Amino acid sequence: MASKKDLEQLSCTNCSIYNCRTKSQQFPAFCLTTKDVAGHPIDNDIEDIKKHLQGDDQDAIIARASAQVEGLFYGKLTRVEEIMEFANRIGAKKIGIATCAGLIEEAKIFADILAAKGFEYYSAICKVGATDKTEIGILEEEKIRPGNHESMCNPILQARVLNYQKTDLNVVIGLCVGHDSLFIKYSEAPVTTLVTKDRLTGHNPVAALYTAHSYYKKLLQKKE
């Protein structure tokens, strides 16, 4: 039987019951739904959040719209269609597109789709500002092509541009890992993701998880 200390370290990826989804079984002793987390009574959080999302502010509107899109269109819509359905349900009219330069053609197609469905859009590419990487402390040898101008990705400027445009919802298309973090941090509008960049898997990062016991088994090798 697990000790109290062990239970404190267990979390959702240690579970095989998932009673939080249906409440048709028993919660395990370490379930985050029923135990205090790092000294915080989780029951208080559950009630606080529930009351918060029963209101009429943006968080509540987003929470209900998200649940409606999931429940009404489960397995029926593509991610592109889900984003537009979600946008309609939160009253978003102007959609911001924060795109990677490497996926600009995909961003153009998405923009055409938005326009066809009656949305306004405004896009900002990651290289906006054309600032060389060395200007923020990157060494020449750390560039993809040393010795050449190589514009840094500028997700903070992307966010500011879309903030200036007063977009209602911003959509990430393939921003680099970390750059997406900065964009989300500085975006004033809610953010959702259409494409997550993974150059090796054709932007399908879950492929590395599906093949972690075969082609990508190096991922599970213990760190020395």
Image: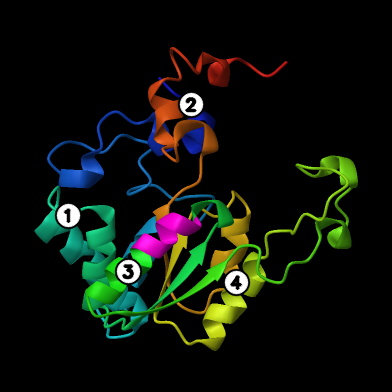
Q: Amino acid at mark 4?
A: Gln
Residue marked by disc 4 = 158
* 174 vs 184: above or below: above
Tell me the magenta residue range. Answer: 104-109
Q: Amino acid at mark 3?
A: Asp
Q: Which mark is residue 77?
A: 1
Q: Is residue 71 left or right of residue 197?
A: left
The residues tagged by marks 3 and 1 sit, at their Cα atoms, a distance apart of 18 Å
The residues tagged by marks 2 and 4 sit, at their Cα atoms, a distance apart of 49 Å
Q: Which of marks 4 and 2 precedes in the sequence?
A: 2
Residue marked by disc 2 = 3
Q: Principal SS element in the magenta part?
A: helix
> Where is the C terminus found, in terms of image quarters?
top right
Q: Are marks 2 and 1 in contact (CB under 8 Å)?
A: no
* 121 vs 197: above or below: below
Q: Which of marks 3 and 4 precedes in the sequence?
A: 3
| Mark 4 crowdedness (10 Å alpha carbons): few <14, some 14-19, many ≥20 | many
**Mark 2 or 4, closer to the camera:** 4
